Amino acid sequence: MYNIRQFRVSEVEALRDLIHHTIDVSYLPVYPPRAVQFFKEYHSEVKIIGRFTKGEIFVVETDGKLIGTGTIVGVDIFGVFVHPDFQHHGLGKALMKELEEKAVTNGISEVALNVSLPSRKFYENLGYEIIEEHAKDVGKGQWLHYWEAKKTFMKGQS
């Protein structure tokens, strides 16, 4: 059984470790090393705390262990990760539902997020519309490819 709840600042190291492990397992097969490093820096402890002070971070917990996370800051969703051992069991979908419900509760009718190579199908299946493709030069001839996506909520929908 799992529980979705609010993140506690005292968990920042465990949360960073979860995110970095998931990046290693899920991104190394599809992104070059410098792009993987960019993702890890983008999800450093300092950045996690920065997002926490501006928005809300949810975690998925089972048996006292963090196995998933997602953040909402204004209209933007960030850092949605599920530990590789727990992927494909509906946790990501449940986490996104929590984040989308929070957006609607906050009066937001449209959310935006960036979509990585391994997560595109997941977000499209949740109704996210790909808006624009991006390629970021991360140096030494290596590129980070991703997409911007959005989802609009109808009244009473999340």
Image (spheres, rainbow, N blue to C red):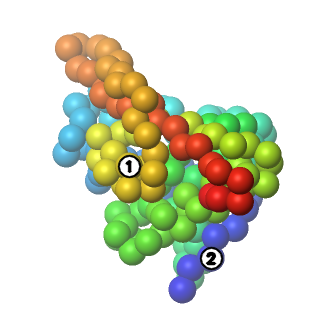
Q: In which quarter of the image is the C terminus?
A: bottom right
Local packing at callout 1 (Cα closer than 10 Å; few below 14, some 14-19, many 20+) is some
- The kind of residue tagged 2 is Asn
Label annotation for residue 124: 1
Residue under the image location 52 percent in, 38 percent down: 150
Q: Residue 39: percent from the left, percent from the top?
A: 42, 35
Query: Label 1 is placed on what type of residue?
Result: Glu
Residue at 22% of width from left, 31% of height from top? 32
Q: What residue does disc 2 label?
A: 3
Mark closer to the observer (2, 1): 1
Where is residue 141 shown, x and y percent of the image? Answer: 20, 14
Q: The N terminus is located in which quarter? A: bottom right
* Towards the viewer: 128 or 156: 156
* Residue 57 in sight from this viewpoint: no
| Rendered view: 44 above or below 124 | above
Image quadrant assignment for residue 138: top left
Q: What residue is drawn where x is 78% and y is 54%?
A: 105
Picture quadrant where residue 59 is located: bottom right
